[in-house]
Image: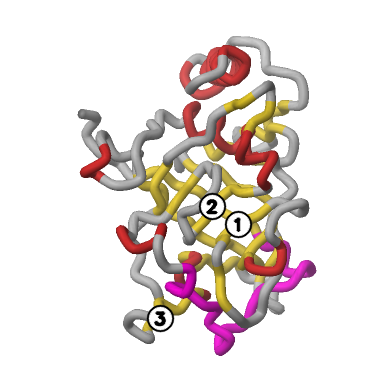
Amino acid sequence: MKSGRLVNFSLMLCILCGGFLFADQLPLPYGAKILPGGDLEVNGAIVRRQAREIALPCRFVLAEGALEVIVSKPDGRMHETLLCTDIAAVQVQALLYLLGAENGSRLPEQGRQGDLIDLFIEWQDDEGKPQRQPVEYWIIDTQTGKNLKQEGWVFVGSTVHNGAFLADLEGNIVINYSVGSTVLDSPNPAAMDDDTLHVVDARKKQPQEQNKPMLVLKPRQVKKR
């Protein structure tokens, strides 16, 4: 990271919440609370302690059409995103650090690649039963005509410039057209040159607000280099 402000924020969150994950005895930061099941909620985002994953409230945006963004903020590119969340990008990045994820380059040949993060959508169906699908379930790969393979999303991480966390400034959490600042990016080498790689799978039913959809970010278990 290039900014002491973001480093300090991340360190504060990780130190304080790290006690929750590992010792249970340190004070929690402002806006955080322990849920009845033992998980941690931080300003609407939930850290699932045992599963080592993060859950964010979200909503579907596009029902059809081309995608350049997978998860946007409300002030981001809403005309070309699959999902939207109100959780700040800087908070998502800090919570990924908390889970031990490391950011890095988008592609391996550019340096140490950032850790891969799997994305899922959880919701309650119309009968109240819990459901969970990878986000790729709603994405068509135009190169194959099939649903996008679940290859993970690269934790590239955003930086701060002139006091602004750039991913929040641009409204990006996860992008698939690799132009702009973001927390997670596509591992596809062609993603920087082609903005037509992915479209919404309009055949698939999308959970609605009453189904309480949640975006789940789960770092893959890898041996640290």
At label 2, the amino acid type is Val
Q: What's the CA distance linking mark 1 and mark 2?
A: 5 Å
Q: Nearer the viewer, residue 88 or 45?
A: 88
Which residue in the structure is indicated by mark 1?
Answer: 71
Q: Identify the magenta region.
A: 195-213
Asked whether residue 137 is in view, the answer is no
* Quadrant housing residue 17: top right
- The numbered dot on residue 142 is 3
Location of residue 41 with respect to 11 vertically, above or below? below
Badge 3 marks a residue whose secondary structure is loop
Between the residue at mark 2 and the residue at mark 3, the CA separation in whole angstroms equals 19 Å
Residue at far bottom of view:
203
Instruction: Say how many tags the image has.
Output: 3
Q: Are marks 1 and 2 in contact (CB under 8 Å)?
A: yes
Residue that sits furthest to the front in the current view: 193
Q: Residue at x 49, y 34 (%)?
A: 96
Q: Is residue 18 magenta?
A: no
